[in-house]
Amino acid sequence: MKKFEYKKGKAIIRTLKEPKIKKKKFNIDRLIYFLILIGLFFWLVSFAYKKTTWIHGNGQMLMEKVDVNFTNDIRVKDIFINEGQMVNVGDTLFNYFQDDFDSDASLVLRGLDRTEKRDHDLQELSKEIQLKYIELNHLKEQLALLISREKQAVKLVLLDVYIKVQLDDIINKKLQLQSKIKLLQSEINLLGLQKKYLIKSPGGFMGTGSNYGNAYISPIKGVIGQILKNSEEACYKTENVMTIHNEENVFIKAYFNLKDIAEVKEGSMVYVEFPDNSSSKGIINKLYIATYEAPSEFQKKYEPTERNILAEIIPMNKEEIPEWGKYYKLNLKVKVSKY
């Protein structure tokens, strides 16, 4: 047998190279899945929060306005203002013809009739004033006699010739005469004012000095909206000449679901969301007793028409009124907190 010999020396250890582990690719599907779950979670939380905390409704921004129209057909003569112009109470906006579209000739004739009537009224007033002055002079003469009688009566009472009752009777008559004189002087002053007014008022037109039949005076302070008629244009009784908007009286008409009738209360604070994503705060100023149909843009298509609670909302901060006015006739979102 071959003899076994142990070899002395350095041992050689053979090693194997570990294979490189490939990095896993980014799993986009899993990320999308988690994002959908997170988004769904937040949507559910937001939905539950809105349903349990807020009452939502639709609103429309409005402002007080006057539609200028007439119960009879008219013909506009001259318009003195433009769209967007500010006007005050008492400003003359336009003049017009009435009475079945009168011609200029008929207007002149009626102007002459009014002049004659004015002159006649002036004559009657002058006569009445003269008669009042005659009566006044007569009362003053009576008063002067009573004053002299009163002086004599005082002396006679001191001499025990007259009794005090006789003096009191003279004093009472004097006081009555003085009251009549004051009343008569007031009547004369009033008649004098009427006479001045008739003298100043023109015969053809009362109030503005125009040569035409009538003038329309602004009943409110505001801004002129649409002017729907031009000078020398007819306006029938079913039409408007123009509109006047009162920018100081801005409000929202808001429509809420009937199921929220117990939550929507007068005096509640309302959050208003405007179309440009800005927001503001308002207060429910008035709740209407009856229910109303919301405008068509607030109704769901192909579903029965619903009736809604109608509320009027005004700005909480009066300084925001001009800002609210910029959204006139626009639709808004409103919400009221349940707590």
Image: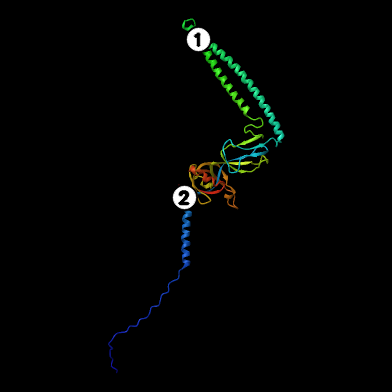
Cα separation, mark 1 vs mark 2, equals: 90 Å
Instruction: Tell me residue 28's x, y (percent).
Output: 47, 67
From this viewpoint, is residue 151 visible?
A: yes
- Nearer to the camera, 104 or 184: 104
- Nearer to the camera, 236 or 206: 206
- Nearer to the camera, 71 or 307: 71
Badge 2: residue crowd in 10 Å (few <14, some 14–19, many ≥20): some
Q: Which residue is mark 1?
A: 151
Q: Is residue 27 left or right of residue 68?
A: left
Instruction: Tell me residue 190's x, y (percent).
Output: 58, 24
Q: Which residue is mark 2?
A: 53
Quarter-wise, where is residue 116 in the image?
top right
- Residue at 69% from the left image edge and 29% from the top image edge: 113
- Nearer to the camera, 229 or 295: 229
Badge 1: residue crowd in 10 Å (few <14, some 14–19, many ≥20): few
- Residue at 68% from the left image edge and 31% from the top image edge: 111
Colour scheme: rainbow
Mark nearer the viewer, 1 or 2: 1
Q: Amino acid at mark 2?
A: Thr
Q: Which mark is residue 6?
A: none
Q: Secondary structure at mark 2?
A: helix
Q: Amino acid at mark 1?
A: Lys
In the current view of this chain or complex, which residue is farthest to the bottom?
A: 1
